[in-house]
């Protein structure tokens, strides 16, 4: 079984447990105000395994299912013998990295809390875009493939604008910074990926 499937299974398990356990849900959610005052930084990670409802969970896990194995296989090829562990570390650090960005913005806002794997899933999606920028990506409500690099630009633009606007109870800050983390993390491991990325774009044009 791949690491991607294990992540999906574990996330589904924790999410369903928290659906019926409000105390567990509150204890694990990302709550910057609480974290800053009580040092509960474990929430940066645990919140990535919670979801608000089954549809939220399904949406995130379907996205991870479609793109996770491709990214996982790159890590396994890059780090033969332990690439799966590096991929798992990438995913977990992506959750924390996305949460840390939200923490900086909302650490003095007592009413803000967030949950979900969206930051880490965005990291996986943008790692995929780095590896295959011209492959079409379809939105659930737009059944037309959009080249990955165009989708990525639109995603970052929308996340940035929505984060500035606020008021919709969605952690767009985590989405944005998770995506940025996912794009640049593989580049740190293998800088030549950028040349491959540009070459694929030039061939597409």
Image (cartoon, rainbow, N blue to C red):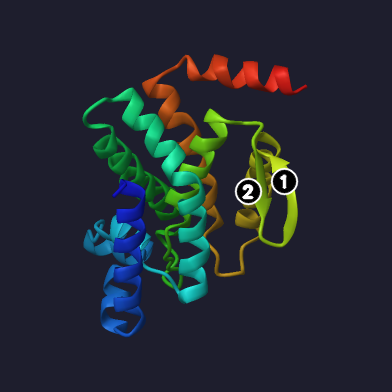
Q: Which of 46 and 15 is in front in this view?
A: 15
- Tell me what residue is drawn at x 29 percent, y 77 percent: 17
Q: Can residue 108 be seen in this view?
A: yes
- Foreground disc of the pair 2, 1: 1
Of 26 and 36, nearer the camera is 26
Question: Which residue is at a point 35% across and 45% down the rendered structure image?
Answer: 91
Residue at numbered disc 2: 160
Q: How far apart are marks 2 and 1 (CA)?
A: 23 Å
Residue 177 or residue 12, whichever sits in front: 12
If you read the primary sequence from the N terminus, does the residue marked by circle 2 or circle 1 appear first? 1
Q: Which mark is residue 170?
A: none
| Residue at numbered disc 1 | 145
Kindly identify the residue that appears in the image at 62 percent across and 31 percent down. Answer: 133
Q: Is residue 167 left or right of residue 13?
A: right
- State how many labels appear: 2
Does 3 appear above or below 85? below
Judging from the image, what secondary structure is the residue with disc 2 in? helix
Looking at the picture, how far across and down is residue 34, in whole percent? Answer: 31, 66
Query: 73 above or below 92?
Result: above
Q: Can residue 174 be seen in this view?
A: no
Tell me if 196 is positioned left or right of 109 in this view: right
Disc 2 crowd rating (10 Å Cα; few below 14, some 14-19, many 20+) is: some
């Amino acid at each position: 079984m791949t690491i991607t499937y294990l992540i999906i299974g574990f996330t589904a398990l924790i999410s369903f447990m928290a659906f019926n356990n409000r105390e567990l849900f509150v204890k694990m959610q990302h709550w910057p105000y609480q974290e800053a005052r009580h040092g509960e930084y474990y929430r940066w990670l645990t919140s990535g395994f919670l979801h608000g409802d089954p549809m939220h969970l399904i949406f995130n896990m379907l996205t991870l299912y479609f793109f996770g194995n491709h990214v996982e296989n790159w890590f396994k090829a890059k780090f033969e013998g332990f690439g799966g562990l590096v991929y798992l570390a990438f995913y977990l650090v992506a959750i924390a990295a996305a949460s840390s960005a939200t923490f900086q913005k909302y650490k003095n806002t007592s009413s803000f809390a967030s949950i979900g794997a969206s930051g880490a899933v965005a990291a996986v999606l943008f790692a995929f875009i780095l590896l295959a920028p011209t492959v079409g990506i379809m939105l659930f409500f737009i059944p037309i493939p959009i080249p990955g690099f165009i989708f990525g630009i639109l995603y970052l633009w929308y996340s940035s604008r929505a984060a500035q606007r606020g008021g919709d109870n969605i952690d767009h800050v985590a989405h944005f910074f998770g995506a940025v983390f996912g794009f640049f993390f593989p580049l740190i491991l293998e800088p030549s990926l950028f040349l491959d990325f540009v070459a694929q774009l030039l061939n597409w044009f």
